[in-house]
Amino acid sequence: YKLKHLLEDLVEVSKASSGNMELHIERLDAGTILSQALGEYEERFEEKNLETILNDCEEGLYVKADSRKLWRVTDNLLQNIYKYALPGTRVFLEAKDIDGKISLTFKNTSRDIITVSAEELTERFTRNDDSRHTEGNGLGLAIAKTLTEAMGGKFTLNTDGDLFKVTVIFDKDTETEKETDTYTESSENSDAV
């Protein structure tokens, strides 16, 4: 099962980074997606005594994105928090409109001091040196970053000692009606990896 999951992750990150991923772009409420994804993690966070603080999760934070891919980004970031946050600490999440951009922010205190640069953490197969004994294949952040960028968003990761912060930013969709577009990010064959 682990090998199959690893191969699926590799194919997904390869397609996204090469521009050969089919996207189903639609109007989505990013705040709602964050709230729903957090609901999936509440019990697991409680197991590790992680207190979740959901700040500024406004309604009507519409973006144009692929719902499955945006869910995957959010899920990967929450999974990363679950795996690597220091038990008994707070997790700060927020979704807000900042000058016409929709910002989703994930902040936590890492269980270990982060010894790898933010740039390296978003590369494939990279994990913080002190946490190599844990589960994970080092693809979660790389997938989150490449999927965000494939949908036209911006992914930034900042670390400071044991503080970990990811911000995902999309342009705000100000249209009032729902439109759905399906397209392949590149004009090349979408089956190529």
Image (spheres, grey):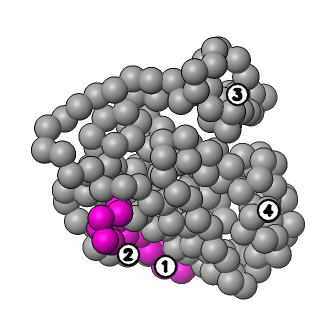
Q: Helix, strand, or loop for circle 2?
A: strand
**Amino acid found under the numbered disc labelled 1:** Arg
Mark closer to the chain start, 3 or 2: 3
- Residue bounds of the magenta highlight: 89-102
Q: Disc 1 vs disc 2: Cβ atoms closer than 8 Å?
A: yes
- Disc 4 versus disc 2: distance between alpha carbons? 28 Å
Of residues 157 and 77, the one nearer the viewer is: 157
Name the image quarter holding the N terminus: top right
- Disc 3 versus disc 2: distance between alpha carbons? 34 Å
The residue carrying mark 2 is 53
The residue carrying mark 1 is 90
Image coordinates for residue 43, horizontal then vertical, percent: 43, 57
- Disc 1 versus disc 2: distance between alpha carbons? 7 Å
Can you tell which of label 3 and label 1 is closer to the viewer? 3
The residue carrying mark 3 is 11
Mark closer to the chain start, 4 or 3: 3
Crowdedness of circle 1 by 10 Å Cα count: few (<14), some, many (20+)? some
Q: Is residue 97 left or right of residue 89?
A: left
Image coordinates for residue 87, horizontal then vertical, percent: 59, 74
Can you tell which of label 3 and label 2 is closer to the viewer? 3
Is residue 94 on the magenta stretch?
yes
Is residue 191 on the magenta stretch?
no
Mark closer to the chain start, 4 or 2: 2
Mark closer to the chain start, 4 or 1: 1
Q: Disc 4 vs disc 1: Cβ atoms closer than 8 Å?
A: no
- Disc 3 versus disc 1: distance between alpha carbons? 34 Å
Please tell me whether the stretch drawn in magenta is mainly helix, strand or loop.
strand
Residue plotted at (14% across, 38% down):
177
The residue carrying mark 4 is 120
**Amino acid found under the numbered disc labelled 4:** Glu
Can you tell which of label 4 and label 2 is closer to the viewer? 4
Residue plotted at (30% across, 64% down):
100
